[in-house]
Amino acid sequence: MSKINYRKVAVDGLDVFYREAGAVNKPTLLLLHGFPSSSHMFRDLIPLLADRFHIVAPDLPGFGQSDAPSRDRFAYTFDNLASVITRFTEVLKLDRFAVYVFDYGSPVGLRVAMNHPERVTAIISQNGNAYREGLSDGWDPIRKYWQEPTQENRNALRALLTPATTYWQYTHGVPDAQAVSPDGYSLDDFYMTRLGIHDVQLDLFLDYASNVALYPEFHSYFRRHQPPLLAVWGRNDPFFLPAGADAFKQDLPNAEIHFYETGHFALETHANEIAAAIRQFLK
């Protein structure tokens, strides 16, 4: 089994934590996590790929072990998260890499790819949406906040930051909830208790509207550059519907689409199957 190293690197004044495995002379695969998780979500996937790839999995600012500066020092927007990850790849001298995007990692990674298409060799999207067709009705309370960013609508979203909701995200749509390790959602809940993190997350809920506004630009990037794309999707995701995976073919006719009988956090139950699909796709 390949050794996994746990490191931090300074990126323009922020300490960014990351997991790294595999030989540096192998093709690089950058793993970008989502809400409310961290690079810990890749704990089962990394050992399954590290013999073939140089794996780098950072924690986004405000998540996991990376710095979480106060909101008066750092504006929590997806543009800023993408800027930090772009600089992170530059500091680590990652000139060419495939990117695995999940949930929040999708708009972050797609910004990186769109702004630097020469660097991104392929995209693996695991429930990483980029089309309106993929947004379920579960987004309605957040959509309401986009349309009316009042304190009342902001406070209504605090229910999405509770341990009960985190557990539901991990287990909804999973045939057997007992197959989901408590480690992931318990660690997410721990990180969520840090001072100020709830408001960080509420800021990102509001700014998620910027991702939807960018969908046409993401689609233009797909059409122009035709990056190889693999979608590995938990079919029962309550937030990002299977139609969001199928929609990639509108702009990327050669996209590979795989569905699995599981929920949002597909790696919790299907890491082996997803790793096999990635190995074949990047062969």
Image (cartoon, grey):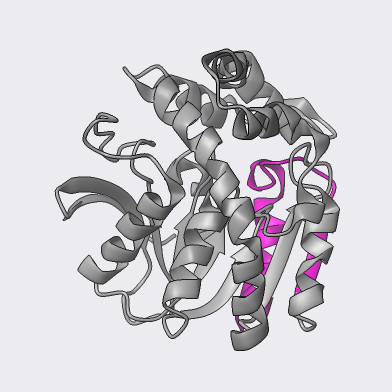
* Percent of width and height locating residue 19: 35, 53
Horizontal side of residue 146 vs 2, given as left or right: right
271 within the magenta span: yes
**71 or 69, which is in the foreground?**
71
Image quarter where the N terminus lies is bottom left
At x 78%, y 61%, the residue is 245
Horizontal side of residue 99 vs 280, given as left or right: left
Horizontal side of residue 52 vs 58, given as left or right: right
* Percent of width and height locating residue 251: 75, 78
- The mark tally for this picture is 0
Is residue 180 visible in this depiction of the protein?
no
Residue 198, compared with residue 28, is above or below; it is above
Is residue 186 visible in this depiction of the protein?
yes
**262 or 209, which is in the foreground?**
209
At x 66%, y 67%, the residue is 216
Residue 191, compared with residue 156, is above or below; it is below
Per the rendered image, the range of residues in magenta is: 256-283
59 within the magenta span: no
At x 57%, y 56%, the residue is 106
Say which quarter of the image contains residue 198.
top left
At x 34%, y 19%, the residue is 194
**174 or 256, which is in the foreground?**
256
